[in-house]
């Protein structure tokens, strides 16, 4: 302020809008014009050849003269020429995004890649990838987060921004700086320096909006855009970018937050289900007594057996559906490991009761919730300390990733477990891959639809299989999409069915959109108490009549093998 206690006027006076019809703002600032202006389009690099044609002039004119105009047809401006110009405007040596694709690698088949991108964008098949978050040191010792988008996302975003600039640049005034053509933050510093050197200035106000972009309301931003943009295709593209998420230090926080919300706790993603199980069991103290189901995932059983052989733990296997037997086994135990339903026998435990009993005795409680999914049960709410998932199965749901996860309660006790699990993940190289984690999050968005359909299919099949002459015993817990049947004719009968289907796939794994069938005892690691003739059916989302027709045909081949009474 001056000696008369009056505020300084603006160092940079109000200027004409930065558009092609008005004067340049730099003239008022007393400096040379900045390179580029709002009327310009993406300038290709020297290797680009012919740049994108200018077809946005009419859009600019309408935007400048009619402030209420809403633009209904914009996406056609994002053509191959504009995508090509956007590619050549990128920095060739910039860091790659989560897919690892560099500028030079993409350019090796540039025309084919751009044609493919253009086709996917215009038919609605384009999928945005998450940004890779890195941190840049600041002078004060703090770190500034920076999101690095995948190259193809950069190309498309730059092309769309150019189209949007034709509309919104008409509303800015010359002294508005930011991520604008010819009005970058460094240009603002140049203008400020010019103003300070030519005017008497006593005060400079520097205000920083802390965490502005990380706390920006996406829905508010979408509504703001809808005031001028009525092309739903462009709005959907922007929504995809906003929803794509961020990968930070190899961990996709968006996935962990989503799974944590479903289970009611705090999640960590691991490189595989086995890695998650191993991390959870690492919480058991040395020499621990561990109570576990007689029937459980064979990988869990292998870890427990190794613990016992190495003298690290004493393992008590028990029928988890027999609560009295579980309670008796808990005497002196340190850890209770539960599965419900169990794999592959589909035994169901009274989780609240056995968890309560375990806690009363000071034991740590863990539960593999892969089969049930958080849509059916949330073990944390029943008393579990740690929940484990094979993300490969129902959460991701498309049999194309290998991931695992743990979830702990949001409490002081849960936080201690969470910290120990995160440390184990780091020290044992169990960090999940970024692309796998992104695929899992994308798959989890349809989990409720997949589980609903596959569970409905399983209920119908269970009803039809119950009295089938080729089925000796049906195992079905009454929910979920896993069924187990014991086929008449022993091992030979089971193999006849498993190899006789066509729509069903004879393979390991479960929880995907496709239906799988497998005789579990073909694996040496499977418990010997699992019947040789047991088939585990992971029911998918195919048409129920197609599934039944295929399965019934295979079962019919078994009936002649069954001895008559």
Image: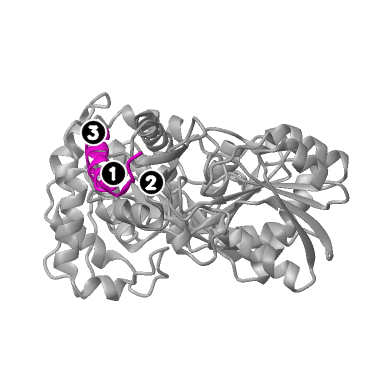
Q: Is residue 324 above or below residue 330?
A: above
Tag 1, which secondary structure?
A: helix
Label pair 2/1, CB-CB below 8 angstroms: yes
Q: Using residue 132 as the reference point, say whether residue 153 is left or right of it.
A: left
> Is 53 in front, or is 285?
285
Residue 429: horizontal and vertical position, in percent? Answer: 60, 71
Q: In the rendered view, would you say 433 is above or below 8? A: below
Residue under the point 28% across and 75% down:
105
Q: Say whether residue 186 is visible.
A: no
Reading the image, the residue beneath label 1 is 559
Magenta span of residues: 543-565
Q: Which residue is mark 2?
A: 488
**Residue matched to label 3:** 545
Residue placed most toward the observer, 225 or 20: 225
Q: How many other residues sit within 10 Å of disc 1, few (<14), some (14-19) or many (≥20)? A: some
| Residue 41 in the figure: left or right of residue 452 | left
Residue 350, position as x, y percentages in the image: 68, 33
């Amino acid at each position: 302020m001056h000696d008369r206690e009056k505020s300084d006027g603006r160092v940079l006076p109000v200027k004409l809008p930065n558009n092609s019809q008005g004067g340049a703002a730099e003239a008022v600032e007393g400096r040379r014009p900045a390179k580029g202006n709002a009327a310009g389009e993406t300038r290709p690099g020297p290797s680009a050849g012919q740049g994108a044609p200018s077809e946005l002039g009419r859009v600019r004119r309408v935007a400048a003269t009619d402030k209420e105009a809403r633009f209904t047809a914009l996406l056609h401006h994002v053509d191959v020429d504009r995508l090509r110009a956007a590619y050549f405007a990128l920095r060739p040596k910039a860091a790659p995004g989560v897919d690892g694709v560099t500028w030079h690698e993409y350019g090796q088949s540039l025309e084919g890649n751009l044609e493919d991108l253009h086709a996917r964008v215009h038919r609605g098949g384009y999928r945005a990838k998450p940004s890779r978050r890195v941190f840049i040191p600041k002078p004060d010792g703090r770190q500034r987060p920076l999101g690095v988008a995948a190259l193809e996302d950069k190309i498309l975003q730059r092309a769309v921004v150019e189209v949007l600039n034709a509309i919104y640049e008409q509303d800015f005034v010359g002294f508005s700086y930011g991520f604008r053509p010819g009005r970058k933050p460094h240009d603002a510093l140049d203008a400020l320096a010019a103003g300070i050197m030519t005017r008497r200035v006593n005060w400079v106000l520097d205000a920083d909006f802390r965490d502005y972009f990380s706390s920006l309301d996406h829905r508010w931003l979408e509504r703001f855009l809808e005031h001028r943009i009525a092309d739903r295709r462009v709005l959907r593209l922007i929504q995809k970018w906003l929803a794509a998420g961020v990968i930070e230090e190899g961990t996709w926080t968006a996935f962990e937050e989503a799974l944590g919300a479903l289970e009611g706790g705090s999640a960590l993603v691991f490189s595989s289900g086995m890695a998650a199980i191993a991390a959870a069991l690492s919480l058991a103290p040395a020499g621990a007594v561990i109570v576990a189901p007689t029937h459980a995932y064979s990988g869990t059983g292998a870890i427990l057996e190794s613990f016992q052989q190495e003298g690290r733990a004493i393992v008590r296997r028990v029928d988890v559906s027999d609560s009295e037997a579980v309670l008796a086994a808990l005497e002196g135990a340190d850890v209770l490991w539960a599965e419900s339903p169990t794999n592959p026998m589909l035994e169901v435990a009274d989780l609240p009761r056995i968890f309560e009993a375990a806690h009363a005795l000071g034991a740590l409680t863990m539960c593999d919730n892969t089969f049930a999914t958080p849509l059916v049960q949330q073990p944390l709410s029943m008393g579990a300390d740690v929940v484990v998932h094979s993300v490969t199965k129902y959460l991701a749901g498309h049999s194309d990733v290998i991931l695992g996860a743990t979830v702990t309660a949001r409490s002081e006790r849960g936080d201690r477990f969470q910290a120990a699990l995160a440390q184990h993940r780091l020290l044992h190289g169990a960090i999940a891959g970024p692309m796998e984690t992104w695929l899992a999050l994308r798959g989890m968005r349809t989990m409720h639809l997949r589980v609903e359909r596959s569970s409905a299919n399983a209920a119908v099949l269970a009803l039809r299989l119950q009295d089938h002459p080729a089925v000796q015993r049906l195992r079905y817990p009454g929910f979920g999409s896993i069924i187990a049947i014991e086929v008449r004719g022993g091992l030979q009968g089971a193999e006849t069915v498993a190899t006789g289907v066509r729509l069903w796939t004879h393979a390991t794994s479960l929880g995907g959109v496709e239906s799988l069938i497998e005789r579990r005892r073909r694996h040496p690691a499977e418990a010997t108490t699992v019947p040789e003739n047991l088939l585990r059916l992971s029911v998918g989302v195919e048409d129920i009549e197609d599934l039944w027709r295929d399965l019934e045909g295979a079962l019919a081949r078994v009936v002649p093998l069954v001895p008559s009474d």
